[in-house]
Structure formats: structure tokens, C-alpha cells
Image (cartoon, rainbow, N blue to C red):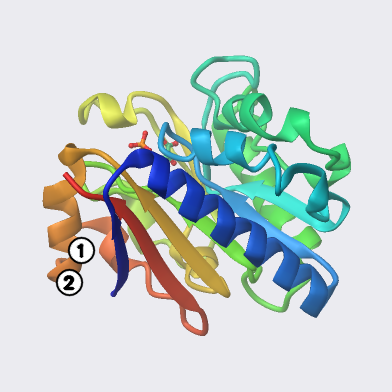
Amino acid sequence: MNITYLDTADELVERAAALIADGIQASVSERGRCLVALSGGNTPKPVYERLTRAPYGPELPWDKTVVFFGDERMVPCDNPESNFRMACDALLDHVSIPPWNVHRVAGEMQADVAAEWYARQLAEVAGDDGPPRFDLMLLGLGPDGHTASLFPGTDALENVKNLAVHLAESSEGAEHAQDRVTVTYPVINASRRVLFLVAGADKAEALQRVRDGDLSAPAARVNPVDGSLEWLVVKG
Ligand code: 6PG
């Protein structure tokens, strides 16, 4: 595993922002666009905020950057729990990305319908034969080993048919307290580049399980077929 350990959260922010910016520019140069899936949760928020400031911000080709989300909580987009709202507050409302380049999960809709509609957007916009090939897939790691909203013990882990699926609300701890929609492994593992951003001592055990190849940790099953897999981890 390509893991880079960093001493502080600020170092992760700087390193992640640089990697993401380089990835956007390289994808646009090579393929005319960058198809990126943003992660939710807390860790990526300061990274997204950093991307609004020099030397990034207006220097990046936002008009050629197409944004999806690895997962979403099934809440209205103005709800503080919404990953879309977090990304807008931190990044998307502060750069010149055309609104038609941003594809959110309709968290206000009935979850199964929202999942189906999101899967259709993934297929249409990506335009690839088979799963969409994200140029950059950002992911996080939960203390239980989940990533995106691929939670342990859920049917979503075995779903190789749909590009996106709905997970019903579960009593399994606060991590999965809402209905969610998530992309599936075929989408994640078709990515050209997967970048995990991990911070928090509560992730150490889950990260060790991933490093040990313990497939009961959903993040351990992220393995791009023809792409790179990188981890930025804040020590401690
Ligand atoms: C979400 C994320 C989820 C997140 C991990 C880590 O919607 O919450 O997609 O998979 O990446 O739970 O979250 P933190 O970065 O907040 O620790």
C-alpha cells in the first residue's frame, strides 16, 4: 500500500490539496476534463477549503472539472449533514465551476429513486463503456473500516450490478444513522486514481485491518483495476 504518514492535519491538507490540484490539471491536459468524486465527512473539508486559495482557486480548470460524490446522506441539500452542502460551503460555491458540472445525489428524494437517478447520471456523464472511470476518487475511512457508505455487513458490499445503491438507515451505531446512497466497488475500482484522506486516532485499528488485508473492513476491498491507490494518513 502506498501510504504517506503526515505529522499534522495541516500537513495532510497541504499535501492533499497539492495532489488533487495536480490531478485535476493532469487529467484536463491529458483527457480534456477531470472527473472527480468528492468524499464526505470531516477530514476533506479543510482540503476543499484549501483548494479555493492560492496557488489553486482560479488557477485550476474548474470549467473542465466534473464533480460527483462518493456517497451522500439522504437529507435535503441544505441540511448540515449533507456532503453536497459541505462541499459547496467549502469549495464549490467559491470557484468558477459551472453548476451543470456538479452532480449531487438528490437527498430530498425517496432513496431508491435517488440512487437510480444518480446511477443514470454516472453512466451518462462518464460516457465510459461499463463503470465510469473517475480520474480522481477521494475516499475516507471510518473507525469500522467503512469507506464512502460501504458499511460492514451490508448488501452494498456485494453489489456489482448497480453503479450506486441505497442503504437503509441502520441501528448499527452513529456512523450510519441516516439512509445513504453510495457508489459501489465497480465504480471505485474503475478509478484511475484513488486517494484516501485519513485523520483521527480512532481510525488506527481500521487502517491496520486494511493493511493486513482484512476484507471485513470494506476499505480493504478498494483496489483499482487499472489505477493508483494512495493513502494520506495523519499519524496518531
Ligand atoms: C461520509 C463519508 C464517510 C467518511 C468516513 C470518514 O459521508 O461520512 O463518505 O465515508 O469518509 O466516515 O469520515 P471523517 O473524515 O469525518 O472521519
Within 10 angstroms of label 2, few (less than 14), some, or many (20 or more) residues? few
Q: Is residue 14 visible?
A: yes
At mark 1, the secondary structure is helix
Disc 2 target residue: 213
Q: CA distance from mark 1 to mark 2?
A: 5 Å
The C terminus, quarter of image: top left
Within 10 angstroms of label 1, few (less than 14), some, or many (20 or more) residues? many
Residue 117 in the image, given as x and y percentages of width and height: 70, 44
Residue 193 in the image, given as x and y percentages of width and height: 53, 70
Depth check, front residue: 235 or 133: 235
At mark 2, the secondary structure is loop
In the rendered image of this protein, does residue 192 appear above or below residue 159? below
Amino acid carrying label 1: it is Val
The N terminus, quarter of image: bottom left
Amino acid carrying label 2: it is Gly
Residue drawn at the location 54% of the way across and 65% of the way down: 187
Q: Give the side of residue 144 with respect to residue 223, left or right.
A: left
Q: Give the side of residue 130 with respect to residue 210, left or right.
A: right
Q: Give the side of residue 223 with respect to residue 22, left or right.
A: left
- Asked if disc 1 and disc 2 are in contact, CB closer than 8 Å, the reply is yes
In the rendered image of this protein, does residue 81 appear above or below residue 148? above
Residue drawn at the location 52% of the way across and 84% of the way down: 226
Quadrant of the picture in which ligand 1 is shown: top left
Disc 1 target residue: 210
Depth check, front residue: 108 or 116: 108
Depth check, front residue: 235 or 145: 235
Q: Which residue sits furthest front?
A: 55
Residue drawn at the location 57% of the way across and 27% of the way down: 86
In the rendered image of this protein, does residue 188 appear above or below residue 79? below
Residue drawn at the location 20% of the way across and 44% of the way down: 203
